[in-house]
Image (cartoon, helix red, strand yellow):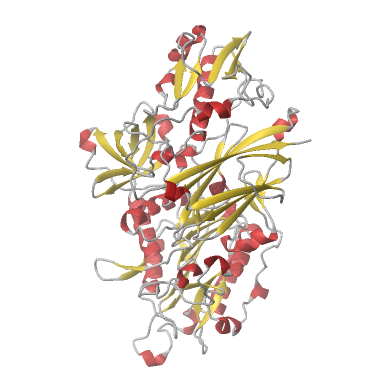
Amino acid sequence: MAQSSSASRQHWAILIGIDYYKHEKCLQGCVRDVLNVKDYLEAGPDPVNISMLTATTPSDPSSHLPLEDPHSWPTMINFVNELQRVVQNAKPRDLVYIHYSGHGSREGSSKTSGDQSAQQLGNLAFVLFENNKYGITYFKGEILASCLKKMVEDKELLVTVVLDCCFSGSVLRAGDVRAAGIRSVEYNSAADAALPQHEGCLHDVSRDTSYHLRDSTLWGDEWRDKWRDKWLVNPEGYTILSACGPHEVAQELETRNGEKRGALSYFLLKTLSILRKQGVEITHESLYEHMRIVFHVCWPQQTPMRYGNKNFSFFNGPATASNSPFIQVYTKSNGLCLDAGEAHGVHTGDTYALYSPEWLVDATDQAHNVPVTAQVDVVRCLTSDLAKIMPETAATEIGTGWHARPLTSLSQRKISVRLPASFNGQARQTGATEDMRYLRLCSEEDAVACMFHVVLDQDRYKILNGLNEAVANLPAIPADEQGAERLMDSLQHISKFKYAEGIENRTPDAQFEASFSCVSSVSGGEPRNSSVFDVEHGGTWQLEIRNNSNTALYLALFDFGPSWKIHNLLSDSGNGGFWVLEPNCPEPLPLVMEVPEFMQRNGQGCCEDVIKLFVTNKAATFPSMVLPELPLYGSYHRGQPYKAGDGLSALVAGLTGSARSDDARHEKWATRSFIIRTIKK
């Protein structure tokens, strides 16, 4: 077993499981959920201070009370007391785990109409047991946000919250959807008014809390009110794992021995148990990605969601973020599958290195010692099939939970770079040409159009664009002994950047394209359909995307920045790798744009970002899309200043060509790209 990295920190857990409700439909697996969580925590390497609040359905229906002692009932006062106990006694950097398994609701969910966009649904509320005439009370989302604020910002605790309940009131409008095992109830305003919310004992969430994306900020009271139940108080200090997207219901499943369990609790413990037996150190990101694949394979009607910090875990303590993103591998009846497809830039014949969960060493350090390889056999929109496992004896060992990283790519859209004759031999001597997934090197004699040209100017290598102009914000590389290797590193970096920037669906599905629409505006101006915008430094560019269909869509959002960095705006802001676009709803996304400080220091008053969004009909993440900032070498800080006549965008358009015609009908995707020029006057 991996040695715990959090042995010096105390662990606290509050576990809430509610099967019994006086007047609402009782559940069957919630108490069992938290009892199993308790067993798992007690069997772990770190002692955990555990408190349990449960309501078990009585065998005598006339008793109208849970079997437990009243001090252990999941009532409002008992829950608040447990939260206060942790806040008062925990020390900075202690780890706190809160697990809720029961019914969920939203304020106003009983006021239904046929038009979803007209619904004014409030915050998520946890439906607690109460010994009064209503039998319930609501622990509202803003109160949990207040607790998170106090724990994270005031006490510097690391908090994990697991919510195994329905996360959206929208499901209540679909007629009789609350079949047995659905963990949602309609909102009862009378029950809500019958008991105070105990807000005086906890600090309210600050009204000026901002929600950050990149260097940009989501702003405005309307935006905060709309997204307040995402609780982004300080995403560095907490993680929330929820059972399903806002458009879905959280269900109880039946195991082989006939037990009812919450799907999230069941697959969470199953994943944790597997990883513990394998001795794998766990982060919330690795836990979530593994669990998401298990849901995809075994329980596809729910899509678990993650919000907040992805790099620490209650189960293993803080961890260092990995710079080497992996793609999940899983098994289905037809064989081995890769959780990436055409939208991720995968092509038939690409080769991937496969790593077992025990493979803890960064794969980038094992380039010459790859344990298992596989080739892509069939590519769909969002997933692919793997075949030709080498060595063949390893085929029986590979299964769900393995990870993959690309080794070679057969894409015809590689980024062409022309090298001077004097450098061609040096490039091949560096060994860097072994990694040519996105890069094609051309000589001066090759009669092909190239996106970049390398020239030797006195004692420096310069990288020019297709118009022989200096490229913005590329490091000047000294032509010394290490210059060849450094130049190849830079070329590989920018080739991946431009390759990813140029990904688009070249066989678009007209019906899917019509299922959503986008309009943009600058600083509150008139919305328009343009893809190029000029924004003043500190001004706001707002994208509004609307799901026009009757089913949920999924959004991933990336910023291709001026420092040659690609980052996931949603993941970096504390959300998971994607957002759910609910049916028939507009989603405003305002971004405050700024010229980066490093450019201002160099006297550059203009920069260009490309905001690229992926819309899919199934939950999809893009871990291999992320790219760190281009490293700076030597005493040279940055390349030549930005020029408005840069021809890179036009050259990217030339990368399109004929496309496959065998898209899987059940997987759909589309992209949109927006060029945002930020100008500081």
State the residue at coordinates (57%, 79%). Answer: 77
State the residue at coordinates (65%, 74%). Answer: 199
In screen coordinates, is 428 left or right of 332?
right
Residue 78's quadrant in the figure?
bottom right
Question: Is there any visible trace of residue 620 in the rendered image?
Answer: no
User: Which quarter of the rendered picture does the C terminus lie within?
Assistant: top right
Vertical placement of residue 191 versus 10, above or below: below
Q: Where does residue 622 sit, x and y in percent of width and height? A: 46, 43
In screen coordinates, is 391 left or right of 601?
left
Residue placed furthest toward the right:
681
Vertical placement of residue 225 versus 560, above or below: below
In screen coordinates, is 289 left or right of 152?
left
Residue placed furthest toward the bottom:
62
State the residue at coordinates (63%, 77%). Answer: 198
Q: Where does residue 675 sit, x and y in percent of width and height? A: 61, 37
How many labels sit on residues?
0
Q: Where does residue 491 sit, x and y in percent of width and height? A: 52, 22
Vertical placement of residue 303 versus 285, above or below: below
Q: Where does residue 146 sit, x and y in percent of width and height? A: 63, 66
Which of these two is toward me, 157 or 342? 342
Which of these two is toward me, 14 or 166? 166
Question: Is there any visible trace of residue 201 in the rendered image?
Answer: yes
Which of these two is toward me, 75 or 383? 383
State the residue at coordinates (66%, 20%). Answer: 635
Which of these two is toward me, 568 or 71? 568
